[in-house]
Image (tube, grey):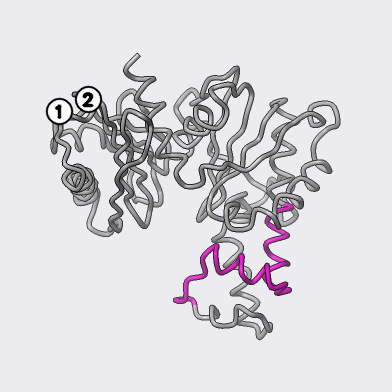
Amino acid sequence: MAGSYIISVDLGGTKILSALINSKNEIIGRVKIPTDIEKGKEYLVETIAQSVKQVMAENEVSERDIKSVCMGVPGTVNPFTGVIGRAPNLGIINFNIKESLSNFFSIPVLIENDVNLAGLGIKKFEFNNELNNALVVFIGTGIGSALFFDGKLYRGSTFFAGEIGHMLVDAKGTFSTKSKKSTFELSASRTAIVREIKKELRKGKKSLLNEYKSPKKALKSKGLALAVKKGDPLATKHVSKAAATIGTVIGSITTLLNLDTIILGGGVIEAMHEFMMPRIKTAYKEAVLPEPGKNVKIVSTQLGDDAALYGGIALSEEFSS
């Protein structure tokens, strides 16, 4: 059937993941290519096009079989014009990636903020589209979120809604008027957790994570999770601190917005779900006012990193209706 497939692209600072999805909403092929932002945005677009063409070739489908290419971008995105306003991790400012990517094939290209796209996937496939007033927060290398009001994705007046990672908090996770260095992202992301752990390791703190003392040695979420599982005091301390900050921030946001559902995802949550969720919920209860906070459901996504890929299905449906 012509146009029965879509291709979802998860564009990140380190990798481009393209997935082919059939008419039964099944992911039937994946291609992952490293992101090289040092060579500029034109080269980046060529690499995205390469990954799209590769996933098509590997699964023996042609352009006429593809309904749309739907891409999630880590930054502010206008999905109607295709312009990326600002994507710091990609080094992109005010660039029409939709127009540029369309030069490589005739398939319609749709773009959206990556966490908004994940939120659309979660809403459709985990909540059967019955998500009302909700906050989706992804904790990974950075922190981003998506907002839903009355069941609809809220993109904001200038498509900046959901940039939760840039909110100012102090060291205890409460809101702050201090330096911009005290952001939510710089306090509770994996980057922040690893930064603080490495700082203590360099000061001679003993830990199961001593091998990661070097700035060049990357500490990923799985490594953190293993250390926490083994009861390493240093890992436990900083992951607990991040969990408390997350709980405090989402509690304060619930007081402001009177949400009914909060969904957490991202590599950090996926790797340390059992350890972090109880601590997040404890901090949440301490931060939120009783009335708006008492009946809020706080869960972690079951789709994991595939949420944005599945979100491509919902985005395609939105822009074809």
- Where, by quadrant of the figure, is residue 61 drawn? top left
**Observer-nearest of 266 and 12:** 266
Q: Secondary structure at mark 1?
A: helix
In the shown orientation, is residue 37 left or right of residue 116?
Answer: left
* Residue 223 is one of the magenta-drawn residues: yes
Question: Which amino acid does the dot numbered 1 rest on?
Answer: Arg
Q: Are marks 2 and 1 in contact (CB under 8 Å)?
A: yes
Q: Main secondary structure of the magenta part?
A: helix
- Name the disc covering residue 64, or none: 1
Foreground pick, 164 / 315: 315
* Residue at image point 27% right, 33% down: 69
Residue at the farthest top position: 321
Residue 40 placement (x, y as % from top left): 24, 53
Residue drawn at x 50%, y 31% is 125
Q: The N terminus lies in which quarter of the figure?
A: top left
Question: What kind of element bears circle 2?
Answer: loop
